[in-house]
Amino acid sequence: MKCPFCGDQESKVVDSRHSEDGLSIRRRRECLACQRRFTTYEIVESLPIIVVKRDGTRQGFDRNKILNSMVRAFDKRQVTMAELDRIATEIEQTIQNTLEREVSTDKIGEMVMERIKPLDEVAYIRFASVYRRFQDVRSFVHEIEQFLEEK
């Protein structure tokens, strides 16, 4: 870390604390050359994720859309909001960790289905019916048959 007073590159950390907002770390440093102290802040750099929709349009990632779609699928089912929030956070972190800046809605849908399948069979089928755009009863029955074969 470059000292703002003398420009030397060597310093030591004297004190570290989380900032009030909890999104950064405040560090007090001491320059090894001039012994003056200064404050730095560390924040996590997160690059925006772009979602590529089925029609080719692009928009910013919004974890609330994932959460809302799961809430609709789990309507009147026994699952806590905390569990759905955990799944949405897990999906968001997985996408961030891939370091890819664009992700398709198909990939996101598969990630949701993979995580809700063990939680509730009915919610899984509900979500799949919207995500896979069932056009008729046959496609709906086919999905249920596939689900039962995997069990």
Image (tube, rainbow, N blue to C red):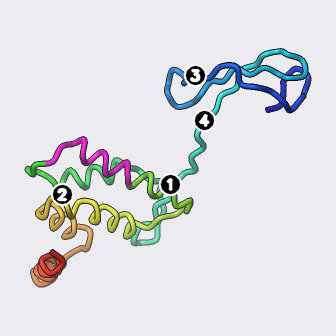
Q: Gap between marks 2 and 1, in whole Å?
A: 24 Å
Kind of element beneath mark 2? loop
Q: Earlier in the sequence, mark 4 or mark 2?
A: 4
Q: Earlier in the sequence, mark 1 or mark 3?
A: 3
Badge 3: residue crowd in 10 Å (few <14, some 14–19, many ≥20)? few
Q: CA distance from mark 4 to mark 2?
A: 35 Å
Q: Amino acid at mark 2?
A: Leu
The furthest residue to the top: 36
Query: For the residue carrying disc 4, how many other residues have a C-alpha within 10 Å: few (<14), some (14-19), or many (20+)?
Result: few
Could you say whether the residue bearing mark 3 is in a helix, strand or loop?
strand
Residue denoted by label 3: 17
Question: Residue 37, position in %: x, y?
Answer: 78, 16
Which circle's residue, 4 or 3, is located before the other in the chain?
3
Tell me the number on the disc at residue 96.
Answer: 1
Write down the residue under mark 2: 119
Answer whether labels 4 and 1 touch (C-beta < 8 Å): no
Q: Are marks 4 and 3 in contact (CB under 8 Å)?
A: no
